[in-house]
Amino acid sequence: MLVRQAGDRYVLLEFGPLVLDIELRLRVHVLMTALKDLQAQGQLPGIIDMTPGIRSLQVHFDPALISRDALLKTLIATEAALPPVDDMVVPSRTVHLPLSWDDPQTKLAIEKYMQSVRPDAPWCPSNIEFIRRINGLDSIEDVFKIVFEAPYLVLGLGDVYLGAPVATPLDPRQRLVTTKYNPARTWTPENAVGIGGAYLCVYGMEGPGGYQFVGRTLQMWNRWRHGEAGTVFEQPWLLRFFDQIRFYPVSQEELLRIRADFPHGGYALRTEEGSFSLKDYRRFLADNAASIAAFKATQQVAFEAERERWAAAGLAEVASEADMEAAGPDSEIDLPEGGRLIATSVPGNVWKVAVSEGQQVQAGDVLMVIESMKMEFNLLAPASATVHKLMCAQGGSVAAGQNVLVLIDEAV
């Protein structure tokens, strides 16, 4: 166990090496449970909350109620007294979730990314084809089969806001591995389902992201209607640690109906109570060790071959800061009388040019939308004016401080 200082009110506990290991996740779970028991007995004051990760536990404490040194002593003593996880069995529901495969909203996000961020990305225009290729699978149908047959064990919640699960297949032979978007997307549809590294995530809300899409499902978060009769939300988030997710295919139209009904208790979600036994899981891994090793070897060869293709095609690196500074024509322009140069304050990509040359604009009108740092920034007209000249194109790159258009003030 490694304990890191994390600001003045947090400590971060990490277990073992930086690898995917379900036994380490159970170790974190046992420690968190023991600390909660101490809290309930009044022996651990000042703990505000605890946030478990795959192999980590973040502890938020109030230094007015417990000193860091006292907390560290308790953490070390509690961890040393933990029982072995060898025979551990934890509750593990199976939760069946509808999945719209290659959903139109995820396709829209890919199109937007190609237009304004990186049109030549190896994972475009199809994330699913990229997943197939980088895992050495023979067909898209093989990806489909794995996603819908695999039980995904939920190891974390809140990975990408609002109770978003981070999960991985129990069977390593179903554990698809991918790289993430680089640069990341600025927009991801709510409840998109994607794979990044060895993990699957369901995005809790719209926002940025980098996981490779396979489809879209129903809501992971219900702020207003949890606890009501008819809904399955006992708290605002849907899933629990160690739940097993099983997907089943639905059409995009059916998913839209489900999404409209589900938050109000109008769609019956199928769940089955069960348990996860580490002893049984270890036995499964031992019994299938040869085929698991063969799958991983094939997968690694495909992964390395994909990276070599990137290098050969010049796609291994993305635009550098120096590239951004050299992007597009900048200034030297003879300003007309009353002319005013308008610059972007952030580097990024021109997602949308909202005006045309000769157009009249009013103060506060959107001139352009710049995508930068996973966000969209509106470039606004500072006053009533006429658009004299555009100095960049939609889809192009811009640097911070770069002049992008010329306005002629209306007062002139």
Image (cartoon, helix red, strand yellow):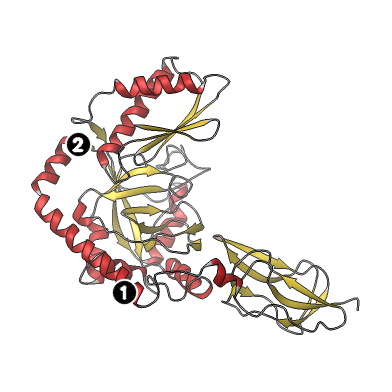
The reply, left or right, for residue 88 in relation to residue 362 is: left
In what quadrant of the picture does the C terminus appear? bottom right
Q: Is residue 241 above or below residue 79?
A: below
Q: Quadrant of residue 62?
A: top right
Q: Is residue 348 above or below residue 23?
A: below
**Residue 52 position in % (x across, y down):** 39, 36
Q: Please, what is the three-letter code of the amino acid marked with disc 1?
A: Arg
Tell me the residue that label 1 is attached to.
309
In what quadrant of the picture does the N terminus appear? top left
Pick whichever, 139 or 66, lies toward us. Answer: 66
Q: Is residue 399 above or below residue 278?
A: below
Which is closer to the viewer, label 2 or label 1? 1
Pick whichever, 5 or 88, lies toward us. Answer: 5
Pick whichever, 342 or 40, lies toward us. Answer: 342
Tell me the residue that label 2 is attached to.
278
Q: Residue at x 11, y 55 (%)?
A: 291
**Residue 191 position in % (x across, y down):** 43, 56
Do we see residue 366 in this rendering? Answer: yes
Q: Residue at x 77, y 69 (%)?
A: 381
Q: Quadrant of residue 87?
A: top left
Residue sitting farthest toward the right: 412
Local secondary structure at mark 1: helix
Q: Please, what is the three-letter code of the amino acid marked with disc 2?
A: Leu
Are circles 2 and 1 on residues that touch, CB within 8 Å?
no
Q: Residue at x 30, y 71 (%)?
A: 308
Marks 2 and 1, Cα distance to the nearest angstrom? 40 Å
Q: Is residue 78 above or below residue 202?
A: above
Circle 2 crowding by C-alpha within 10 Å: few under 14, some 14–19, many from 20:
some
Mark sitting earlier along the chain (2/1):
2
Pick whichever, 120 or 96, lies toward us. Answer: 120
**Residue 155 position in % (x across, y down):** 33, 43
**Residue 53 position in % (x across, y down):** 38, 40
